[in-house]
């Protein structure tokens, strides 16, 4: 699985916490203006900003997109985390998920 994919976190409830973080954004993240040619293609934004289309789910969540079949709002400013932050937060939640499974006895 891709290291920038939130699907590395198998528990949807734990993954939802990551999504909430991404939706809230950070002042440290770059603001990216969504152009008209990108509104239906978060992978295009991911390729332009992150250098890989594999971060498309991050882009979609940060842009407020709930369903990948919908379109993003053109000219909207989306706070996008750098690749290092994406990976760091995914790893954090992977470890949290493992710890929760351990505490619940679900190895």
Image: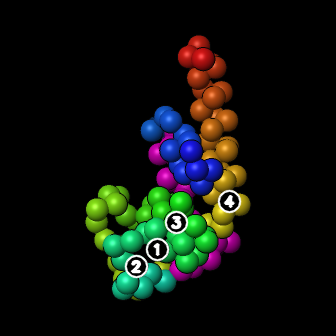
* Residue that badge 4 annotates: 85
SS at mark 2 in the image: helix
Give the mark nearer the N terminus: 2 vs 4. Answer: 2
Is residue 1 among the parts visible in the rendering? yes
Tag 1 and tag 3, C-beta contact below 8 Å? yes
Quadrant containing the C terminus in the rendered view: top right
Contact? badges 1 and 2 (CB < 8 Å)? yes
Q: Earlier in the sequence, mark 3 or mark 4?
A: 3
Question: Which residue in the structure is indicated by mark 1?
Answer: 44
Residue for point 55% across, 77% down: 48
Q: Is residue 56 above or below residue 29?
A: above
Quadrant of residue 104 within the rendered picture: top right
User: Mark 3, residues whose alpha carbon is within 10 Å: few (<14), some, or many (≥20)?
Assistant: some
As measured in the structure, the alpha-carbon distance from the residue carrying label 4 to the one carrying label 1 is 20 Å
Give the residue drawn at x 71%, y 60%: 84
**Could you say which disc has been placed on residue 53 in the image?**
3
Whether residue 15 is situated above or below residue 86 in the rendered picture: above
- State the image coordinates of residue 91 (x, y, percent, origin top left): 67, 44
Single out the mark in the foreground, 4 or 1.
1
What residue is disc 2 on? 38
């Amino acid at each position: 699985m891709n290291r920038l994919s939130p699907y590395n976190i198998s528990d949807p409830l734990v993954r939802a916490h990551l999504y909430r973080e991404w939706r809230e954004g950070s002042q440290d993240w770059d603001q990216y203006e969504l152009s008209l040619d990108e509104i239906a293609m978060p992978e295009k934004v991911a390729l332009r900003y992150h250098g890989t289309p594999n971060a498309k789910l991050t882009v979609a969540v940060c842009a407020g997109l709930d369903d990948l079949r919908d379109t993003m709002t053109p000219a909207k400013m989306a706070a996008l985390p750098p690749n290092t932050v994406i990976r760091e937060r995914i790893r954090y939640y992977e470890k949290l998920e493992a710890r929760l499974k351990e505490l619940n006895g679900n190895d």
